[in-house]
Amino acid sequence: MLLSLERAAGVALGIDFGKSHVRVIVSDLAHTVLADLERPMATEQSAHEGFDAAADLTTQALRQAGVEQTDIIGAGMGVPGPIDVATGEVGSFAILPGWVGVRPEKDVSAQLGIPVKVENDANLGALAELTWGAGRGTRDFVYIKVSSGIGGGLVLNGQLYTGAAGIAGEMGHSMVDENGPVCRCGNRGCLETIASTRQIVDLLRDARDGGGSGSDLTIEEVIAHAREGDRASRRVIGDAGRAIGVVIAQVCNVLNPAKVIVGGDLSAAGDVLLDPLRDEVSRHAVPAAGGNVEIVPGVLGRRAEVLGAAALVLRDVDGFALHSSRDVQQQAG
Amino acid sequence: MLLSLERAAGVALGIDFGKSHVRVIVSDLAHTVLADLERPMATEQSAHEGFDAAADLTTQALRQAGVEQTDIIGAGMGVPGPIDVATGEVGSFAILPGWVGVRPEKDVSAQLGIPVKVENDANLGALAELTWGAGRGTRDFVYIKVSSGIGGGLVLNGQLYTGAAGIAGEMGHSMVDENGPVCRCGNRGCLETIASTRQIVDLLRDARDGGGSGSDLTIEEVIAHAREGDRASRRVIGDAGRAIGVVIAQVCNVLNPAKVIVGGDLSAAGDVLLDPLRDEVSRHAVPAAGGNVEIVPGVLGRRAEVLGAAALVLRDVDGFALHSSRDVQQQAG
């Protein structure tokens, strides 16, 4: 009865623009996912080709969910690059060149005729884990996303915390080696230059090829090798875990979270990654902070961003934060 | 008119037990300090001698403020050691041996017949700066207290944030040197082992004495020497600033605060400390976080803890956090 009342009140849309896909979900206000559709995209896409694909998928998804366009209370969106807070434009660090300079919040809102909110991928992951995943019912947690880049999202007092200018959670740019590699942020020895999946794959490919090129090793293959016992793969993933652990220890000292959730592509490595990470947290954090923090993998896999995008809308609905009741863990992946 | 209504509604008590003093203030609910009294204490004091002194001072302060015991809505309290959250007991790290094992919240509440809340000194400093000092009107800031130890307090979304187990803000135990000195927390190379006033004084005393002992150099003297141009004093304070800056840079990456407020004894060094600190923040933080953060000294000096103790009660009064209207900067010191 309550559920049908809530469903009648509207639905939230989640849209995720990735490097090679667009994904759209429809969720009712009780957090039940009513539709979930994905379409592959070329990396040469223009932003507007992406918007058109999202509009198509939205029409299909609404039909599948059995709701009308007018039922949408809003859309949350993940985009393939950082947004300038002042102008709303996608910045030059975008992973898809066709998106630079576009204003996706404004453009998609105009195209679909609904309110749209944009957030970065790590913050979306944190919101998704809060609503549907490993963070449900946890008031204070840190989410770290380890993929080709490293970012983070903070849930404090049951709410996403984004800082004074919306850029909190940049743990990927904590310095772990004063004289380390130059990072895209302009500093040196950032965690991201040491422990990203890109770095892991590069190290192992170089070793395999003897410095040659042309090999197309993926992080999924590295993780599979590690699970099969390959020493080099385990070592390189473990070293990444240790570096991440040193940074997470400092974050635990500062924020004293109840939980740390590790998401992104590398989290599929499980304890090969997490055991060394936990060791370093317990070695470097003050005992009261490091001894009691639970360090777990995210459970939403590739759905984290699109679910988080829908959660961006759902969290504005009263009483949302700590009362999530639906479990979509079994649907994750 | 509003003020007199608010004053009629009650007063808050702040009590600070330091290494060599007890201090009591009375504040009305409009944040006007009505009385402020201090009494020197011996470091050999028992906790109960401290409580008796606080009770005496409270009676005097109420008389001076022209209010009754029954007007007190509660007392906030700073104590000379960490409190175990589970038992309420002062732990063995207490700076006054006579306090170990005592339960100050319970005991003072019983003795004075009023509700009492305890908080650590750095969190009290943050609350004081929020209410009366350099943090007024700032929604998100980090307070770092640099004295014989180094601690921190976080104000996020206009409220003190203390983490899952009440120990957030332990920036003093961020590692800055993997192979550095052993810290009282059990780790090595913590910021506190490099940049505390104790370390600064020790380094300069050793140099002056040629390793001899018996000298009684104080941090106040070191700061005075630095202001007079003494190279060694400026260098050692500057090095401390740089180490603090490296840690603050990581904190800026994670929390993206609008402001960092540096309090504690070392903050009196001003730009001799803050300029190198700012340089390292701008060098190590991501530009969007490090470029826009304001790094300023605290303005409340030795009154920070006792004012913060009163603020601990005041913040429970409706609409407190961002509506502070009184300025006691000119009374600070």
Image (cartoon, coloured by chain):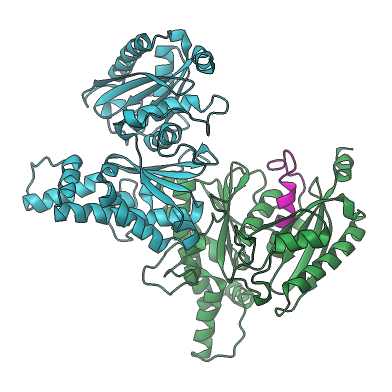
Chain colours: A cyan, B green
Count of marks overlaid on the render: 0
Extreme residue in the front direction: A1
Which segment is the magenta one? B309-326
Residue B121 visible in the picture: yes
Task: Say which of B255 and A257 sits in front.
Answer: A257
Q: Is most of the magenta stretch helix, strand or loop?
A: loop
Where residue A65 sits: x, y (%)?
38, 12
Q: Is residue B190 left or right of residue A224?
A: right
Please determine whether, in this image, residue A287 is positioned above or below residue A3. below
Picture coordinates of residue B138 (x, y %)?
62, 44
Please check the rendered image and state whether residue A8 is part of the magenta-colored stretch, yes or no.
no
Magenta-span inclusion, residue B319: yes
Residue B276 can be seen, yes or no: no
Q: Residue at x 81, y 53 (%)?
A: B27
Above or below: residue B32 compared with residue A318: below
**In front of the other: A167 or A57:** A57
